[in-house]
Image (cartoon, rainbow, N blue to C red):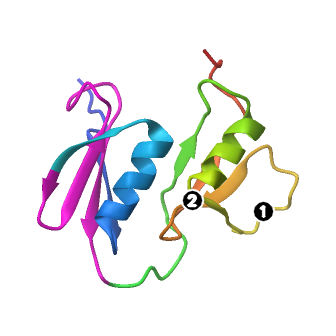
Amino acid sequence: MACRIGELVLECRDPEVLARFWCEILDFVVLDREEDCVEIGTREGFGGPQPTIVFSRNDEPKKADLRLHIDLNATDRDQEAELERLLAAGARPADVGQTGEESWHVLADPEGNEFCLLRARINPV
C-alpha cells in the first residue's frame, strides 16, 4: 500500500489573492474557505488524481527561496505561449541562480513563491 499527496499547503499573506492567481493558472476552483485558509482544486472536487492546494494565512514575510516548488507543464499550448499567459496573469520572472541555458523558466507568483514552467513533458491536447 502507498500514500498519495492529498493537498499541498502554502503559507502566505493573502490567501484570496493567491487562490485567484493559482485558480487562473491551473484552471482550478475554490473548494473551501475557512477563516484564514482557502483551498483550491479541480472541478471534480476533493479526492481526485491531483492534490488540492491550501493557502494558509501567515503574516510573517517570506525569508528565503522555497525548499519545495511547483513545476508546471502546459497542456494545450507550447512553452512560449504558456509563458506569455502566465506573465499576463501576474507571474513574474524570478532569479534563483539559473544560467539562462535551462529548458525551463523560473517564475514567481504574486507573493514571490517560485515555480517553474517546464518545456512540454505532457503532449498538448
| Picture quadrant of residue 11 | bottom left
Q: Is residue 68 above or below residue 104?
A: below
Quarter of the figure with residue 5: top left
Examine the structure image and report whether residue 104 is included in the region drawn in magenta: no
Q: Is residue 42 magenta?
A: yes
Above or below, 9 relative to 51: below
Quadrant, the C terminus: top right
Identify which residue, 47 or 21, lies in the foreground: 21
User: Which mark is in front, 2 or 1?
Assistant: 2
In the image, farthest residue toward the right: 101
Q: Is residue 10 left or right of residue 36?
A: right
Q: Amino acid at mark 1?
A: Gln
Classify residue 105 as left or right of residue 53. Answer: right
Q: Position of residue 111 (x, y in %)?
A: 47, 70
Residues shaded magenta: 33-59
Query: Where residue 106 appears, x then y in whole percent?
Result: 68, 57
Residue lying at 21% horizontally and 29% vertically, measured from the top left: 47
* Residue under label 1: 98
Image position of 82 with respect to 88: above or below: above
Q: Earlier in the sequence, mark 2 or mark 1?
A: 2
Can you give x and y, in whole percent of width and height, for residue 109 in the image?
A: 52, 61
Amino acid type, mark 2: Gly
Foreground residue, 44 or 90?
A: 90
Q: Nearer the viewer, residue 6 or 76?
A: 76
**Residue farthest to the left, as pictured:** 35
Numbered disc 1: secondary structure? loop
Is 83 placed above or below 37 here?
Answer: above
Q: Position of residue 1 (x, y in %)?
A: 23, 23
> Please, what secondary structure does the residue beneath circle 2 have?
loop
Residue drawn at point x = 29 percent, y = 45 percent: 40
Q: Which mark is residue 8?
A: none
